[in-house]
Image (tube, rainbow, N blue to C red):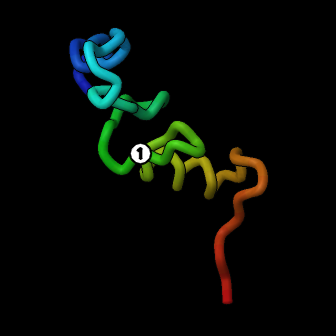
């Protein structure tokens, strides 16, 4: 879980557009972030295993 101060800091508009910090909306993690789902890899996996993300299923071959 990210510190509340870091989450609040990332919500402010940055001085330059390249300084935008994207964070997971569930836990606030910034590394391993997937833009398509607005989730980090850990939360993505948890939701995908529970079937809560439509169109996503585990690979099996």
Asked if residue 12 is positioned above or below residue 36 in the image, the reply reads above
The residue furthest right is 55
| Identity of the residue drawn at 70% across and 45% down | 52
- Report the side of 29 relative to 42 (left or right): left
- Report the side of 44 relative to 29 (left or right): right
Q: Position of residue 58 (x, y in %)?
A: 65, 70
The residue furthest bottom is 61
Occupied quadrant, residue 9: top left
| Identity of the residue drawn at 66% across and 52% down | 50
Total labels: the figure holds 1
Q: Position of residue 59 (x, y in %)?
A: 65, 76
Crowd around label 1: few <14 · some 14–19 · many ≥20 (10 Å): some
Can you identify the residue that label 1 sits on? 33
| Identity of the residue drawn at 60% across and 47% down | 47
In depth, the one of 31 and 50 nearer the eye is: 31
Instruction: State the quadrant of the C terminus.
Output: bottom right
Q: Position of residue 14 (x, y in %)?
A: 29, 15
In depth, the one of 22 and 45 nearer the eye is: 22
Asked if residue 41 is positioned above or below residue 10 in the image, the reply reads below
Occupied quadrant, residue 1: top left
Asked if residue 31 is positioned above or below residue 38 in the image, the reply reads below
Disc 1 element: strand
The residue furthest front is 16
| Identity of the residue drawn at 37% across and 14% down | 11
- Report the side of 18 relative to 44 (left or right): left
Q: Position of residue 2 (x, y in %)?
A: 27, 28
């Amino acid at each position: 879980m990210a510190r509340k101060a870091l989450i609040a800091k990332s919500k402010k508009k940055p001085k330059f557009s390249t300084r935008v910090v994207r964070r997971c909306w569930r836990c606030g993690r910034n590394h391993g972030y997937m833009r398509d789902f607005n989730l980090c890899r850990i939360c993505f996996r948890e939701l995908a295993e529970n079937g809560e993300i439509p169109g996503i299923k585990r690979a099996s071959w």
